[in-house]
Image (cartoon, helix red, strand yellow):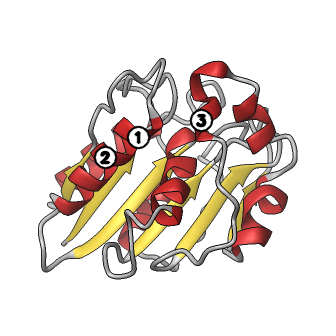
Amino acid sequence: MSSHLILHGWQNHRPAGHWQHWLAGRLTGLGHHVTYPQLPDPDAPDLDVWLAETVRHLTGLPGGTERVVVAHSASAVLWLHAVARGAVRAGDVDRVLLVAPPSASVLAGIPEVAAFAPPPLDFALPGPVRLVAGDDDPYCPEGARTAYGEPLRVPTEIIPGAGHLDLVAGYGSWPAVLDWCLDPAAKLTARPA
């Protein structure tokens, strides 16, 4: 069994219909340890508070298991801040999935999350990291591969028509992300129609 930390994005109050909620339930049902916290003030998040919460929840995962992080939207960029600031290091996590990170230009234009604009992407990420995003994500018009995948040199999977991989895009259940949590070699594909 493995331990999973699932981190939500801006304005996400962990609705029952969201794929992250669905994923937490499925993993728990299979006997995995899951931490899926409601991060403070999701409508007006404080970067430093979210960083502290991320580290607190990560260090609270049980030892002796594979430690997996799944971060969506603003929390995908939050993870980059955690690494850039040295709050997360090699050995703290076994693998990470960054889902639909918003681009710097979009974040900078939204006062509530402007502080989340990514740091310079000139560092190595600990543990194997994968990136997945829609090819039409309105929060990353530059494209996730260009904005994040290439600078960070991480494998990037682009899903046609997946938008921001959120409820608006129809991502209530997402079997491919569960498959990846169980098998890091699994391909991240679109949800079934």
Q: Quadrant of the N terminus?
A: bottom left
Above or below: residue 188 compared with residue 77: below
Q: Secondary structure at mark 1?
A: helix
Q: Quadrant of the C terminus?
A: top right
The residue positioned 79% from the left and 32% from the top of the image is 138
Q: Which mark is residue 52?
A: 2
Q: CA distance from mark 2 to mark 1?
A: 6 Å
Q: CA distance from mark 2 to mark 3?
A: 15 Å
| Residue 140 x %, y % | 78, 41
The residue positioned 38% from the left and 47% from the top of the image is 51
User: Would residue 176 be seen by someone viewing this image from the given angle?
Assistant: no
Residue 74's quadrant in the figure?
A: top right
N-terminal-most mark, 2 or 3: 2
Number of numbered labels in the structure image = 3
| Residue 105 x %, y % | 80, 37
Q: Secondary structure at mark 2?
A: helix
Above or below: residue 73 compared with residue 62: above
Crowding around mark 1 (Cα neighbors within 10 Å: few <14, some 14 to 19, many 20+) is some
Q: Are marks 2 and 1 in contact (CB under 8 Å)?
A: yes
The residue under label 1 is: 48
Q: Which mark is residue 115?
A: 3
Q: What residue type is disc 3 on? A: Ala
Nearest to the observer: residue 107 or residue 173: 107
